[in-house]
C-alpha cells in the first residue's frame, strides 16, 4: 500500500510525510509496547500505537520503522511531530481504534511483521 | 577506516532525552554507509541500553567505538546494580515502575533483545555497584 492509500483508508491526518505519499508499505505491526517493536523485524513497516511520547518516535527510528500511525484520534504533541520530521518518519493520526485501524489495513492486503496474512 | 570514538552522557530518569545517543549513533553510521541491517542492530541495542540506564540505573555513559572490523558499545551507570543477572536476562522479567509501563516499557525484553542483536554481549553488575554492558558488532558479518 502507498502512504497516500493508508491515509485515505484510515481517514487520517498526516502530520509528517507529505513528501513521501508514494512510499510503499507491505507490513504492519500494532502495539502499545515499545519492546514489541524493538524485538521484531519492524523495519519498513507501519507501526500503529496509542502512545504519543517522544519514545514512540525514537523506537521507530532505531527500529527502522517506515511510518507511525497514532490511533483513537490522539494528536501528537508538537515535539513529537518535530522529531518525526527530523527523523524523516511519516506520522499519521487516525480517528479509528487500534482494532479497526488494523482491520482496515489488513483488508487492503497488508501483512503482519513476519509476512503472515 | 581509522578508529573513532564518542561518548554520550545519559542522565538518570531523563525519559525525554533517553535514546538521543543511539539515534545519533545511528545517523553517524548511516553517514559512513554501513550495512543498514548492522546499523539497525547497533541502534536497537544502544537504545535498549539507554532506556535501562534511565529507567533502572543511575547517571551513565554510552561510548561508541568503530574501526574497520567492528562497532563496540559500552553502556555503564552508577545506579543500584542488578542483584541477579541471570534473572534479569530472562524474557519477561522486569521491575520497571508503573510510570514507564504506561509509556510502553517494562516488558522485560530489553536485555534479551540486546544479547540477541549483538555478536558479543557482556554484562557486569552487582547490587550497589552499578551496571556495565559491552556489546560488539562485527562489520564483516553485516546483517
Ligand atoms: N542499568 C540497570 N540498572 C539496574 N537494573 C537494571 C539495569 N538494566 C536492567 N536492570 C534490571 O533488569 C530488568 C530487566 O531488564 P530488561 O531491559 O530486560 O527489561 P525492562 O527494562 O524491565 O523492560 P523493557 O526493556 O522490555 O522495556 C529490569 O527490569 C531491571 O530490574
Ligand atoms: Mg529494558
Image (tube, rainbow, N blue to C red):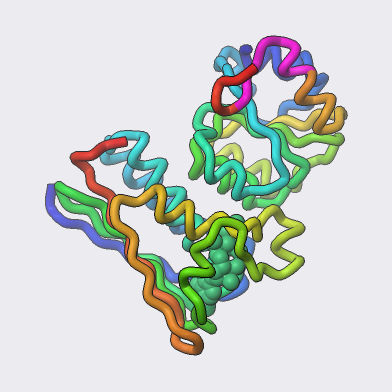
**Residue B75 lies in magenta, yes or no?**
no
Position of residue B125 measured from the top left corner of the image (x, y, whole percent) = 42, 79
Position of residue B111 measured from the top left corner of the image (x, y, whole percent) = 49, 60
Name the image quarter holding the C terminus of chain B.
top left
Q: Residue at x 45, y 82 (%)?
A: B130
Q: Residue at x 72, y 45 (%)?
A: A32
Which corner quadrant of the image does residue A84 belong to? Answer: top right
Q: How many marks?
A: 0
Magenta part of the chain: A104-112
Q: Is residue B124 left or right of residue A115?
A: left
Check the image and report above or below for B85 versus A1. Answer: below
**Residue A108 lies in magenta, yes or no?**
yes
Q: Nearer the viewer, residue B80 or B17?
A: B80
Q: Is residue A80 visible?
A: yes
Q: Nearer the viewer, residue A83 or B66?
A: B66
Q: Nearer the viewer, residue B51 or A107?
A: A107
Check the image and report above or below for A62 versus B120. Answer: above
Position of residue B29 measured from the top left corner of the image (x, y, whole percent) = 32, 44
Q: Residue at x 63, y 28 (%)?
A: A46
Q: Is residue B17 visible?
A: no
Check the image and report above or below for A61 versus A45. Answer: below
Q: Nearer the viewer, residue B137 or A87?
A: B137
Q: Is residue A90 left or right of residue B47?
A: right
Position of residue A43 measured from the top left corner of the image (x, y, whole percent) = 50, 32
Which residue is outermost to the bottom? B128
Check the image and report above or below for B132 versus A2. Answer: below
Q: Is residue B127 left or right of residue B35?
A: right
Amino acid at each position: 500500500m502507498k502512504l497516500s492509500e493508508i491515509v485515505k483508508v484510515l481517514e487520517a491526518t498526516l502530520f509528517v510525510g507529505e513528501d513521501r505519499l508514494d512510499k510503499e508499505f507491505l507490513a504492519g505491526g500494532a502495539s502499545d509496547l515499545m519492546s514489541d517493536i524493538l524485538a521484531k523485524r519492524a523495519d519498513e513497516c507501519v507501526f500503529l500505537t496509542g502512545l504519543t511520547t517522544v519514545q514512540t518516535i525514537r523506537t521507530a527510528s532505531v527500529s527502522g520503522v517506515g511510518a507511525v500511525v497514532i490511533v483513537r484520534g490522539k494528536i501528537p504533541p508538537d515535539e513529537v511531530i518535530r522529531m518525526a520530521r527530523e527523523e524523516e518518519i511519516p506520522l499519521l493520526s487516525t480517528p479509528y481504534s487500534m482494532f479497526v485501524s488494523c482491520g482496515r489495513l489488513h483488508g487492503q492486503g497488508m501483512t503482519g511483521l513476519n509476512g503472515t496474512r | 577506516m581509522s578508529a573513532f570514538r564518542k561518548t554520550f552522557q545519559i542522565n538518570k530518569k531523563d525519559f525525554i532525552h533517553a535514546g538521543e545517543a543511539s539515534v545519533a549513533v545511528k545517523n553517524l553510521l548511516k553517514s559512513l554507509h554501513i550495512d543498514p541491517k548492522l546499523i539497525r542492530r547497533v541502534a536497537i541495542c544502544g537504545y535498549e541500553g539507554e532506556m535501562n540506564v534511565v529507567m533502572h540505573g543511575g547517571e551513565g555513559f554510552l561510548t561508541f567505538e568503530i574501526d574497520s572490523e567492528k562497532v563496540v558499545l559500552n553502556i555503564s551507570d552508577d545506579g543500584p546494580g542488578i542483584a541477579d543477572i541471570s534473572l534479569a536476562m530472562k524474557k519477561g522479567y522486569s521491575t520497571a515502575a508503573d510510570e514507564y509501563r504506561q509509556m510502553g516499557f517494562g516488558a522485560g525484553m530489553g536485555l534479551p533483545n540486546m544479547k540477541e542483536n549483538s555478536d558479543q554481549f557482556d554484562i557486569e553488575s552487582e547490587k550497589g555497584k552499578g551496571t556495565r554492558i559491552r556489546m560488539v558488532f562485527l562489520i564483516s558479518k553485516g546483517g
